Amino acid sequence: MVNSHNTPTIIYVTNPMCAWCYGFTQVVRRLAALWRGRLKVEVMMGNLQAYSATPLKRTERERMATNWHWVQQRTHLPFDFHFFLHKQHIFATEPVCRALLCMRLLRPVLTLEVLRALHSAFFADNLDLTDTRVLVKIAGMFGVSENLFLTLFESEEIMEQLENEFETVADMGVQNFPSVYLQTRKGVELIAKGFCQLDELEQRLLAHL
C-alpha cells in the first residue's frame, strides 16, 4: 500500500468472517466519513482459518458463540445464532476474502460498503460465504455482473494476489483482527489492536499525526 502526497492513510486489517471486525467496520466507516478528504482508508485482509477443510468441533462452536455474544453486547449489532446448529459447517474464509479482493479491484471506492455487506450476510443473515452463489449475489448488489465477478474470482492471478496479501499482513506482525495501522511519510505504525470505539480510535489517530 503506497501513500500518495501528504494525506495520511490508515490500513484497516480485517477479515469478513471475524466477529469483532463486524463490529469494528462500522467504526471505520464512520471515521472515513468524518475525516473525508483528510484521511485515506485502505482495507487489507488477514488469514483467519482461510483454508480450513474440516467442520468446526463442538468446543470451537461454543467458543465462537461466546465470542459472538460479547461482540453483540458491545456493539448491539444483530447476530443469527442458528449458525451454530450447522454441525457440519466448515469455517473457511478464503472464498469470501477472495471475493472482497475482487470487489476491492472492481469497486475500490465501495470497499468498506462491500465489507459491511459481507459481514451482515454472514453474522446477521446466516448466509454461507463459502457458497459462490451467495458471493455472486452480493457482488451484484454493487453493480458487478456474475460473469465479470466469476472471471476474476476464479482466476489464478487473484488467488495468488490474495495469498501474497495474507503473507504481507503476516509480515506486518498483525496478531489481532481487527488492527489499524497509520501510514505517513514517517512510515507505518500500529495505532489500534482489537476493537475500540470511534472516540478512542480518533484519539489514537490524532496522537500519531
Image (cartoon, rainbow, N blue to C red):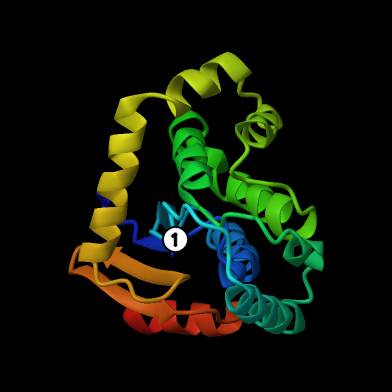
Classify mark 1: residues with Cα within 10 Å, few (<14), some (14-19) or many (20+): few
Q: Quadrant of the C terminus?
A: bottom left
Horizontal side, residue 74 vs residue 8: left or right:
right
Horizontal side, residue 141 vs residue 145: left or right:
right
- Depth check: give the residue in front, 57 or 52: 57
Residue beneath the point at 72% across and 50% down: 121
Residue 126 location (% of width, % of height): 76, 54
> Height in image: 154 above or below 32?
above
Residue 78 in sight from this viewpoint = no
Residue receiving disc 1:
49
- Depth check: give the residue in front, 206 or 113: 113
All told, the count of numbered labels is 1
Residue beneath the point at 56% across and 82% down: 196
> Height in image: 29 above or below 76?
above
- Depth check: give the residue in front, 179 or 205: 179
Residue 200 location (% of width, % of height): 54, 85
Amino acid, disc 1? Gln
**Which quadrant of the view contains residue 84?**
bottom right
